[in-house]
Image (cartoon, helix red, strand yellow):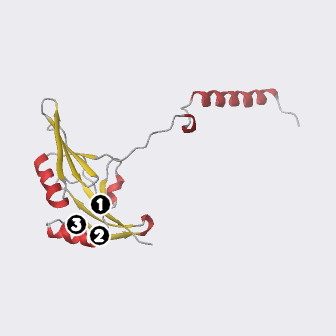
Amino acid sequence: MRIARPAIRGIITIAAFTAALAATAAPRAADLPPLPLLNHFMVAISVADLDGATRWYEDVLGFTVEREASLDNGRVVFRWLRRGNERIELVHNPAAVAGPARALPPAHVDVHGFTHLTLETADLAATRAALLARGVTLVVDITEVKDLGIKVLFLRDPEGNYIEIAERLRN
């Protein structure tokens, strides 16, 4: 069987184009220097009421203020909260605007972007009891998510941000 020359030229042209495109594409990970170890540092949450949010994270979840700083002549305030290895950065910018309201979990993941903060506990039932004693209203009570290997509950901070508390399931 004989292939017409224009078809051969087309194949060569496509092959040449593909090779040229590959040569100009982003480098492959194997060709790049190794990325140093990255550890979780903190989650930043923009809040309208910095003092109210701070009190809530202290009183309800046991965080303490670690550091505070500001930018723009004190207009934008950053407050770092810590509990063990966990850090939350509360950011107050009076010019910030409210974001879109999210549906209740699990439908809250239907909007791209930050969905929730997850904290881990070794005893979800005891954590639930302690939260209820502090007057917290649960958004989602203890729910087992076998496919993820966890059981969780959800609550909401005073700014409307969801917080998931998770316990790993034992095999």
Q: Bin the neighbour count of mark 3 within 10 Å (Cα to Cα): few under 14, some 14-19, many 20 and up.
A: some
Labels 2 and 3 touching (C-beta < 8 A): no
Give the distance between the C-alpha atoms of the residues marked 2 and 3, in whole angstroms. 13 Å
Three-letter code, disc 3: Leu
Compare residues 74 and 137 and report the one nearer the observer.
74
Three-letter code, disc 2: Leu
The answer, for residue 49, to whether it is visible in the render is no
Residue 133 drawn at (x, y percent): 15, 70
Compare residues 7 and 34 and report the one nearer the observer.
34
Picture residue at 55% right of the left edge, 32% below the top = 27
Residue for badge 2: 124
Residue for badge 3: 138
Q: Residue furthest right?
A: 1
Three-letter code, disc 1: Glu
Give the distance between the C-alpha atoms of the residues marked 3 and 1, in whole angstroms. 10 Å
Label located before the other in sequence (2 or 3): 2
Residue 114 drawn at (x, y percent): 32, 49
